[in-house]
Image: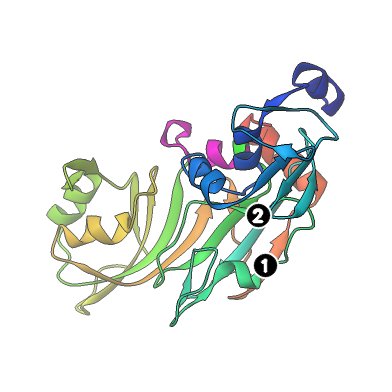
Amino acid sequence: MNQQSKKLQNPKEKVSKYLANIGFASRRGIANLFSEKTILLNGKKAKQTDLLTDGDTLTIDGEDHIVDLNPETEVLIYHKPTGQVCSNVPTEKNDSVFSHIPPRKKGKWIMVGRLDVNTSGLLVFSNNGDFVNFLSHPSSRIDREYLCRVYGDITDKKIENVMKGVNINGEKSSFSDVVAVKKISKSKNHWFYVCLFTGKNREVRKIWSSQKLTVNRLMRLRYGPIIMPENLKPGGWKKFSKNEVNKLQNLLKVQ
C-alpha cells in the first residue's frame, strides 16, 4: 500500500492515538499527558477524542506541531553501554540513552522494549508507534538473542529446565534456544547465546536465577531480524536508510 492510498483510507485520527503514535506518551499514559500539559487543537482546548486531519495544528505547552497522519517510518539502532537507563530522563547516577541519540525535528523517537541499567547491547527506536507496538507485542512472536555470562554450576538438567520453562512471578518463562559459546569447563563462568520470544523485565536474569545461577554479563545482540553491527561501538548509533526500512517492513510484513 503506498502513502497516497493510506492517506485516502485514513483521513482522520483521534488526538489520543496520534500523540501516542508519535511518541509523546505511551498509549496508557495519554490521560496523564492531558492532565499535565496544555494541549490545543487549532487554537482550542483539545479532547482525547477529537479528530485530526493532515495540516491541523496541535499545540503542546505552547509548542506547535503540524499534524502529519502518515509520516515516513524511520528506524534507528543504538549500542547501549552498561550504566545508562532506558528512560527519557537521567537519574542522579545514570545517564539516559536518549541523551546519546540524535533528537528528532518532528515527533519523538519511541523505544522498542528496554534493557536494564546493567545490560548492554541493541536498542531499537522508531518514530512510528504502530510499528513499535508490533515489534514489542508478544503476539508478534519476535525473538531476541542475548550473549550472557553465567556464574555457577551448570548441569544438563538446569539447561533442560530453562528450555522447558520455569515459573517466574506466577508465569512460565523459557528460552527458545540455548547454545554454549564453548564447551563447559571447570570455570564457574560460562558463556551462552540464548533466545526468547518475550521481553519481560529482567527475564533472562530471572530464568537463570531460577536455577541458582547468576548472570554477571548480558548483552542483546539481535531483535528479530535486526542485528547489531559488529562495528557499532558502545554509545554509537545508526539510522536505517529508506531502503533498509522498506526491507525490514517487507520482511516483517508490517507497515
Please provide the residue range marked out in magenta.
131-141
Residue 187 sits in which quadrant?
Answer: bottom left
The residue under the point 47% across, 61% down is 220
Neighbours of disc 2 within 10 Å: few (<14), some (14-19), many (20+): many
Residue 167 sits in which quadrant?
Answer: top left
> Between 93 and 165, which is closer to the camera in this rendering?
93
> Between 103 and 253, which is closer to the camera in this rendering?
103
Please state if 107 lies on the left or on the right of 16 as rendered: right
> Between 62 and 17, which is closer to the camera in this rendering?
62
Display coloring: rainbow
Q: Which mark is residue 101?
A: 1
The answer to whether the residues at label 2 and label 1 have Cβ atoms under 8 Å apart is: yes
The rendered magenta stretch, by its main secondary structure, is classed as helix
What amino acid type is highlighted by mark number 2?
Trp
x, y (%) of residue 251? 65, 35
Q: Which mark is residue 109?
A: 2
Indicate yes or no whether the magenta region holds residue 108: no
What amino acid type is highlighted by mark number 1?
Ile
Indicate yes or no whether the magenta region holds residue 137: yes
Determine the secondary structure under disc 1.
Answer: loop
Please state if 142 lies on the left or on the right of 44 as rendered: left
- Measured Cα–Cα span from mark 2 to mark 1: 9 Å
> Between 154 and 200, which is closer to the camera in this rendering?
200
The residue under the point 45% across, 44% down is 143
The residue under the point 62% across, 72% down is 99
